[in-house]
Amino acid sequence: METVRGIAVRDSMDTTDTTDTTGTTGTTDTASVRVWRVVREPFTAGTWRRFAYAVLAFPLGVACVPLGLAGAPTGRWQRGLLRRLLGADVGGDGSRAGLAHALVALPVNLLTVAVTLYGWSVVPMNLGWPLRAGADPSVAWGGPTFAGAWAFHAIVGGLGFLLLMPWVGRGLAALQLRLARTLLA
């Protein structure tokens, strides 16, 4: 059971019986639960573990290519990163599996780190729009007033990407995990 604004809610896809803090029973639409999940997702530990994996998987993969050619246990390192940050237990112990995964996953990891770092950097960049050099509100989106330009950048670029990036990260992490389970097992 999950608590949303003082209401105990069971995880379900349709309407849910609830009991509020006064003890009255009723039904609530799961749309409010879904909205609450979207709003809180940027602040969960899982989101930041997926962010850390997205950022660390590429440099580890780059390092694993020459070390795998030298015979180092690169598959064990990659499985350890998956287990530590994504909580995925990928079995297997092939000596060449780490090198194969590092080579095949390198383009995916590069794309993931680029999208992740750019997407998350958009959030503070747009929330702090007035602090940017050359931020002229007369030619900016939301202008010609300073307040309009700042509000537009903060809402669309800042809050929009804050709510969007955890879901993009979730999808990219699922892609990386599927690739790892295929190649490292």
Image (tube, rainbow, N blue to C red):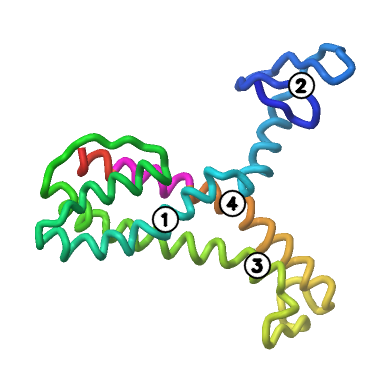
Q: Which residues are magenta?
A: 170-178
Q: Residue at x 77, y 83 (%)?
A: 138
In front: label 1 or label 4: 1
| Amino acid found under the numbered disc labelled 4 | Leu
The reply to whether callout 4 and callout 2 are in contact (CB within 8 Å) is: no
Q: Main secondary structure of the magenta part?
A: helix
Query: For numbered disc 3, what is the local secondary structure?
Result: helix
| Amino acid found under the numbered disc labelled 2 | Thr
- 69 above or below 96? below
Residue beneath disc 1? 54
Left of 180 or right of it: where is 21?
Answer: right
In front: label 4 or label 3: 3
Number of the label disc, if any, that sits on residue 124: 3
Residue beneath disc 4? 164
Query: For numbered disc 2, what is the local secondary structure?
Result: strand
- 159 above or below 130? above
Q: Position of residue 121 (x, y in %)?
A: 57, 67
**Mark 1 and mark 3: Cα distance apart in space:** 19 Å
Q: Residue at x 69, y 37 (%)?
A: 35
The reply to whether callout 1 and callout 2 are in contact (CB within 8 Å) is: no
Left of 15 or right of it: where is 24?
Answer: right
Q: Quadrant of residue 88?
A: top left
Q: Residue at x 77, y 71 (%)?
A: 150
Query: For numbered disc 1, what is the local secondary structure?
Result: helix
Residue beneath disc 2? 28
| Amino acid found under the numbered disc labelled 3 | Pro
Q: Position of residue 14 (x, y in %)?
A: 64, 19
* Label 4 vs 3, first from the N-terminus: 3
The crowding category of the residue bearing disc 4, from other C-alpha atoms within 10 Å (few below 14, some 14 to 19, many at least 20), is some
| Amino acid found under the numbered disc labelled 1 | Ala
**Mark 4 and mark 3: Cα distance apart in space:** 14 Å
**Mark 4 and mark 2: Cα distance apart in space:** 25 Å
